[in-house]
Image (tube, helix red, strand yellow):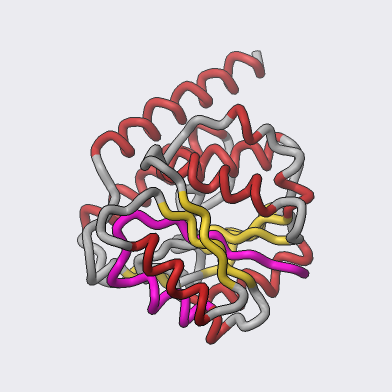
Amino acid sequence: MKTRVLVPTYQELHTLASIVHRIFEHNPNVEVLVIDDNSPDGTGELAEQLKLKYKNLDVLHRSTKNGLGAAYIDGFKQSMDNFDVLVEMDADGSHDPKDLVKILNEIPNYDCVLGSRWVSGGKVVNWPKSREILSRGGNLYARFMLGIEIKDATGGFRAYKTKALKEIELDKIDSQGYCFQVDMVRRFLKKGLSIKEVPITFTERTIGTSKMSKNIVLEAFWKIGIWGFQRILLRR
């Protein structure tokens, strides 16, 4: 299946080259699209240089930084008509390209395959306990409010079949961060599309700073709560 890996970047100058190299090392038949949000540190310029080295790499330059969800949606729209599978993957090294092999092995049988930290065999490395509690608690909240069984709906390492993405109303999605990932899972399940979780190892970044913020957490808490109450009211 023709596959493109979408790698959104904002100030990932010191990690981008390594992650691109490792993606192609372990998955030589994929293509990569770097989606840069006008990084002031020169990440976009580095991505252009990497195009000269890797024939299967392209770059999408966005003029402003307006969220992870918007970056992925732009990448989806540019790629959907030319690829069978689209992958979401971080640029900071927290997602192991070796785990992408497992995800892509499963995608022919499902509409979406999630790399999961919280199923049997999944794990996190170098995370403080506070981050683990936040992630586990957020996923428990999503399962309760949305009535889903997915263990790691907030994870950002996943693959979609493009024919399934075309069933989702991408233009109506305005959520960002972890909330965007939950929103995509919610929309897939509402359409009756199939989802599989496979275990991955998530390693906390050692270079740069996390994009996690209080606003991202609050957005997820608020929107998941609204979706949950809408589900309960509609059921009635």
Residue at x 64% of width, y 37% of height: 187
Residue 209, given in percent of the width and then of the height, sits at 22, 58
Residue 50, given in percent of the width and then of the height, sits at 46, 75
Residue with the most extreme bottom position: 25
| Residue in front for this viewpoint, 129 or 6 | 6
Q: Is residue 18 magenta?
A: yes
Q: Is residue 234 above or below residue 91?
A: above
Q: Is residue 162 above or below residue 42?
A: above
Residue at x 74% of width, y 37% of height: 191
Residue at x 30% of width, y 62% of height: 42
Residue at x 28% of width, y 67% of height: 205
Q: Is residue 38 magenta?
A: no
Residue 231, given in percent of the width and then of the height, sits at 59, 22
Residue 109, given in percent of the width and then of the height, sits at 78, 64
Count of marks overlaid on the render: 0
Q: Which residues are magenta?
A: 1-23
| Residue in front for this viewpoint, 88 or 192 | 88
**Left or right position of 143 against 94:** right
- Quarter holding the C terminus? top right
- Quarter holding the N terminus? bottom right
Q: Is residue 150 above or below residue 52?
A: above
To which quarter of the image does residue 168 belong?
A: top right
To which quarter of the image does residue 17 belong?
A: bottom left
**Left or right position of 200 against 163:** left
To which quarter of the image does residue 12 belong?
A: bottom left
